[in-house]
Amino acid sequence: MTARADFLARIRGEMAKTRGLFPAAAAERPARPRERLDVLRRELIERWPQSLERFRVEFERVAGVFHRVASASEVPAVLEGICRAGGAHSVVTWATPRLGIDAGPTLAAAGIAVHAMPATVPPLEERRRLREVIAHAEVGVTGAELAIAETGTLVLRSAAGQPRSTSLLPACHVALFDRAALVETLEQVGIALEAWHEGVPPEGQGAVINFITGPSRTADIELTLTRGVHGPKEVHAIFVDAGLRAGG
Amino acid sequence: MSEPLITTPLRERAQQALGDRFLHEALDIATTKFIDLRREAFGDFPQGEGLRDRARAIKEATLQQLDRHLERLIDNVERLGGHVHFATTADEARDVILDIARRTGARMAVKSKSMATEEIHLNDALAAAGVTPVETDLGEYIIQLAHERPSHIIAPAIHKTKGQVAELFARELKREVAADPEVLTRIARAELREKFLQADLGITGANFAVADTGTVVLVTNEGNGRMVTSLPRVHVAVMGVEKVVPSMTDLMVFLSVLAKSATGQKLSVYTTLVQGPRRAHELEGPDEFHLVLLDNGRIAQIGGALREALYCLRCGACLNVCPVYRQIGGHAYGYTYPGPIGILLTAMLNGTRSVKELAHASSLCGACADACPVRIDIPKMLIELRKEVDEAKLAPWPERVVFKAFARLLRLPALYRLGGPLGRLLQRPFVRGGRIRALPLFFGHWTRTRDLPPVAARTFQERWTALEREIR
């Protein structure tokens, strides 16, 4: 293995040899990303119905299934419908406070087992058991930090109570979101990403951010489009008009 | 040198590919489809052209301060609890990864698609060290079962029929398998799901790495990139030094053009941003995260003739539009990276000598440069390589002699004028149907794959002189 100093020194040596460079600049990032994001959010909230409509169109274009409900109290019934349609008997969800709803009672009454993930990390033994639970669940329910209208993409962050595999191992992924999550473009996502990384990260933040644009797919055999190769075969998004978060 | 020795000349490899009817059909369908998808994606996206310019400018700006960006990346990855390793050669990169495997007692490694690990021939080294490598991208899984190498940067198994894939699966699983992509995909899902859950080591490449935040970015459609970075105890990412980008804002510019160029999607299904190992309060994720920064010939090109090839995003768009690639496919190129950009990358990784034939496997039509999301001037660098091949006296001597004579001829007007009548006399026995299709002796090598236009009955100069006389 080469040492860091030697490796970088070689790069500097080669850089010194370059001639005739044309002026070029990286993209300009916002000076105060959090402030910029706040301003953006205020602008976006004015236009959320258009953003939502564009999101729906794009999400359906990538084979997502879109649902819309008036309030969070209607979400469990939609979940029950999704489970019944897919013959699912086992559901994993993000920790209830993270999700903003508790579908447990409704689904349990319908004979569907619900496993809400813990908000704190249990000992290794229990972590192994939970992995089995997630791996055998048929439906995974999560929130979404952002919903990108331009591409029909859901952005999820891992964190305490928000394990990565809830949206990955079950064959069906359901994401809940509200108007606070809507952004219009990939460029705006750039502002959000800059803001999330400004200063000290919030307590409980995880190490992974995932952009999810429809169900898992491949075209590796004779370019035939096939869904659900490793990740979910189905992705649902449920939009809650009245909001999921307190006051949202 | 890390590449296996290629024993058959390009001419024979190309001939073999040209004779493969199925390969031809598959290539034709695949590349045409990719071209259409890409065109549609950019057709609906008027800002695309401007974003390509921005993406190019970011790559250039990053290279101009590569040391600083890499230092920031390294510092941030370490701050997040990751380990960074530096590999000057493919050997070093393999050793670093084998060390990690040995130290963590890994028995099985699941891999998501990565050209960088193909480039360093990691799988053989892992297997030799007692670690079973499992490719999890469906296309890569297929070619691993077939003991082959990828034939396209983003669609590694496009040269295989569903029938061939079914046979491979049947042999592996020892049971009948239907030749239906749906069925085959379901089988691969079940087989590989077990491996994801068992493996100790997850190995990936990196599409980008963001210096500002110490983030390694993986773009996949299948979700295997997410599996590999979430389930095993240890995650190792291998990336060429040129993959670093300064900020998240820059990253979004690249994401806006990458998938459109590759598959015509607005975004690939999964874009995964990995920031070090699992945090203490997370339920899942690897306990260890390693980033291997790979040189392997790249650094020498920062100030070299192939500098611009360091912009490459590995989207594969230049392969699909290349008239040569579309005829011979990826394997005939003989090295890890096929297609027009592949010739440049092969020269970068293995030296100019390795492309003395390949440098000519291009018609210089420029379709590759048009398709490239970061507008890499591939034809210009191919000409540069041809010059180097010539100067290093790697080209066959008759070719060098003929071209030298021709160059002299062009510089002497009197001799050039004489060339017209002389050429007409000499070519007489060889012109068939207005073309020179075959020449005798060693000149025959040239006309084997090319027709030469004959010297015209009246050359331009002759006609010009006549015209001038008429006007006067």
Image (cartoon, rainbow, N blue to C red):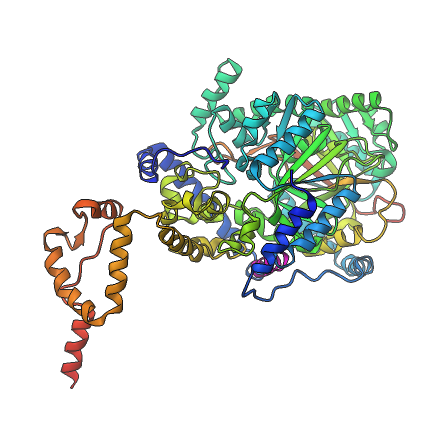
**Residue B154 percent coordinates (x, y):** 52, 40
Q: Is residue B174 visible?
A: yes
Numbered disc total: 0
**Compared with residue B56, is residue B12 higher up or lower down, i.e. above or below?**
above
Is B135 placed left or right of B389 in the picture? right
Is B249 placed left or right of A119 in the picture? left
Quarter of the image where one finds residue B219: top right
**Residue B321 percent coordinates (x, y):** 42, 49
Is B59 placed left or right of A237 in the picture? left
> Outermost residue, bottom direction?
B472
Quarter of the image where one finds residue B98: top right
Residue at 10% in and 52% down: B429
Residue at 45% in and 36% down: B151
Is A152 placed left or right of B443 in the picture? right
| Quadrant location, the N terminus of chain A | top right
**Residue B89 percent coordinates (x, y):** 57, 39
Q: Is residue A233 visible?
A: no
**Residue A187 percent coordinates (x, y):** 68, 56
Query: Start and end of the magenta stretch?
Result: B52-62
Q: Is residue A186 magenta?
A: no
Residue at 59% in and 48% down: B266
**Compared with residue A244, is residue A136 higher up or lower down, i.e. above or below?**
above
Dominant SS in magenta = helix
